[in-house]
């Protein structure tokens, strides 16, 4: 069974002659315990074109030390990574291979670099003997595989202990700097090994293959429509951002991290929305089929996300009630329903991520970005092209809101408001995509539309909650339980929906002020 550890560390340059300062002079450090030297041997694996290294992800099989086994490290922030560990075995465990699928897909995973390290470890303790951090002096020997160049160096690594205050790392760094020990330029041992053992650019080994430098994102414009400042460059940058988010969020969904399903769905929706909004820039004959596949994926993930939202809402509503108004096994029924539906929803989401259809979608997106279907408008200046598209989506939202508000309360209005919510998302995403080109006007418009979207989301959540509460009430009545609490909650949800409908005209008036859209073209 894999386990996860949040790793917060900093690395520093050193030589074999570098001496450590007195670390007990670091505020908070009372003693330093020498744990001796351990020998570590790690083989880092990657695809032949080094896709993992390009994304800052590392996969290794390590022997020696207290944590021998297979390790994957995902970047979280500068100096912070999540390390997922599995027991030592001859082959990569399936549970780790799944976390790499969005990046690796059908490519082979092969040994790329071998690192052998002699690690001299010191534990930094406070006055109570609690571990604050571990400092190690690592003497590293790197070998490019198979049979490539070699490199050697010494570095100092400081890793924060579990539950310790990250401020101790700043204090240690200040002490090290006073001793002339400076931060390393390399983010990891693997990154340094790849850089120092890479063949020269003119080498026959340069390019795809086990001796290649880490793969890089496509940066050089290949057509006039992709040059900086053009509509094509602006839209492609936004689409590329969503593509990278989908790939990066895949393992987070598999790990069941908070909000991961939601964020992955948002990335799918943003890309699909961009295809529709900026159809004058990207040819819809090419993007429409991709958009349909993105819709499929968002739908498969949506069951899990919708269940998360409903569960949280119903539990919060019950918690807000005075105990005297909670009649019958209300919490128990919620828990039983949650467990069954959540389990099924998660199974559906993971089945989608494990499907050949999903991997084909990822490959198709890559192909689209490698050879984008740019139209004539893509060559034009980004500002007028993007502003026109944003205004068009904004007007579309206005029509849907006006139609919904013209209807009387009831099912038809609920459906119309839900359609307006979808239009609000699209208009907001359009403004977000245009922000690099249009600046503050697009940011302000996005903020106003987000308020409308949130209100419409609250309304739709109430509609969904009322349907679930009605089912609970029918079930309770059918087995002879009190349906009072379910009816009470239904009434409160109805009141919440009415309040949202009353607030909508004012919010929309703020989001539809003529000066907002006029500012886009200044």
Image (spheres, rainbow, N blue to C red):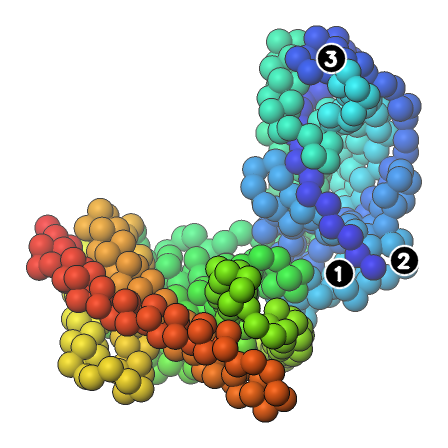
Quadrant in the picture for residue 9: top right
- Most foreground residue, 379 or 165: 165
Where does label 3 land, which residue?
Answer: 23
Where does label 2 land, which residue?
Answer: 89
Q: CA distance from mark 1 to mark 2?
A: 12 Å
State if disc 3 and disc 2 touch (CB < 8 Å): no
Residue located farthest toward the front when viewing the structure as drawn: 324
Q: CA distance from mark 2 to mark 3?
A: 38 Å
Characterize the local packing of mark 1: few (<14), some (14-19) or many (20 or more) Cα atoms within 10 angstroms. some
Q: Is residue 314 above or below residue 143?
A: below
- Most foreground residue, 280 or 518: 518
Where does label 1 land, which residue?
Answer: 96
- Most foreground residue, 342 or 49: 342
- The x and y percentages for residue 257 are 61, 57
Q: CA distance from mark 3 to mark 1?
A: 38 Å
- The x and y percentages for residue 511 are 18, 60
Q: Earlier in the sequence, mark 2 or mark 3?
A: 3
User: Image point 71% across, 20% down: which residue?
Assistant: 14
Which quarter of the figure is the N terminus placed in?
A: bottom right
Quadrant in the picture for residue 345: bottom right
Q: Earlier in the sequence, mark 1 or mark 2?
A: 2
- Most foreground residue, 331 or 481: 481
Q: Secondary structure at mark 1?
A: helix
- The x and y percentages for residue 104 are 66, 64
């Amino acid at each position: 069974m894999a386990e996860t550890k949040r790793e917060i560390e900093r690395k520093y340059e050193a030589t074999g002659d570098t001496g450590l300062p007195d670390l007990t002079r670091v505020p908070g450090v009372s003693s330093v315990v020498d744990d001796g030297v351990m020998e570590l041997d790690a083989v880092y694996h990657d695809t032949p074109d080094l896709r993992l290294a390009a994304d800052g992800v590392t996969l290794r099989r390590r022997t020696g030390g207290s944590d021998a086994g297979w390790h994957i490290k995902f970047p979280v922030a500068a100096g912070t990574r999540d390390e997922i560990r599995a027991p030592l075995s001859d082959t990569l465990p399936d549970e780790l291979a799944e976390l790499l699928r969005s990046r690796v897909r059908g490519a082979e995973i092969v040994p790329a670099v071998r690192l052998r390290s002699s690690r001299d470890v010191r534990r930094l303790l406070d006055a109570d003997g609690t571990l604050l951090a571990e400092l190690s002096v690592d003497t590293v020997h790197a070998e490019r595989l198979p049979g490539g160049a070699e490199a050697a160096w010494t570095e100092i690594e400081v890793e924060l202990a579990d539950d310790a205050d990250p401020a101790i790392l700043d204090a240690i760094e200040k002490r090290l700097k006073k001793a002339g020990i400076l931060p390393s330029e390399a983010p990891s041992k693997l990154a340094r090994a790849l850089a120092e053992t890479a063949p020269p650019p003119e080498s026959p080994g340069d390019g795809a293959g086990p001796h290649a430098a880490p793969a890089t994102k496509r940066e050089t414009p290949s057509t006039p429509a992709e040059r900086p400042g053009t509509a094509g460059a602006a839209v492609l940058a936004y689409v590329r951002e969503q593509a990278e988010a989908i790939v990066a969020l895949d393992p987070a969904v598999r790990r069941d991290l908070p909000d991961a399903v939601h964020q992955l769905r948002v990335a799918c929706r943003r890309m699909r929305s961009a295809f529709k909004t900026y159809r004058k820039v990207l040819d819809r004959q090419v993007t429409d089929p991709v958009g349909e596949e993105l819709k499929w994926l968002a739908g498969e993930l949506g069951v899990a996300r919708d269940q998360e939202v409903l569960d949280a809402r119903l539990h919060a509503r019950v918690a807000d009630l005075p105990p005297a108004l909670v009649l019958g096994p209300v919490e128990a029924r919620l828990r039983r329903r949650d467990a069954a539906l959540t389990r099924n929803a998660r199974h559906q989401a993971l089945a989608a991520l494990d499907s050949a259809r999903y991997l084909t979608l990822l490959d198709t997106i890559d192909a689209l970005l490698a050879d984008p279907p740019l139209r004539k408008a893509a060559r034009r200046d980004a500002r007028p092209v993007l502003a026109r598209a944003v205004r068009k989506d904004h007007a579309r939202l206005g029509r849907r809101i006006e139609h919904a508000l013209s209807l009387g309360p009831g099912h038809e209005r609920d459906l119309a408001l839900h359609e307006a919510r979808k239009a609000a998302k699209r208009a907001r995403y359009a403004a977000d995509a245009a922000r690099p080109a249009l600046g503050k006007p697009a940011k302000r418009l996005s903020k106003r539309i987000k308020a409308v979207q949130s209100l419409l989301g609250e309304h739709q959540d109430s509609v969904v909650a009322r349907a679930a509460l009605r089912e609970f009430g029918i079930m309770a009545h059918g087995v002879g339980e009190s349906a009072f609490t379910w009816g009470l909650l239904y009434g409160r949800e109805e009141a919440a929906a009415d309040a949202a409908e009353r607030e909508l005209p004012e919010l929309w008036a703020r989001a539809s002020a003529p000066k907002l859209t006029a500012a886009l073209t200044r």
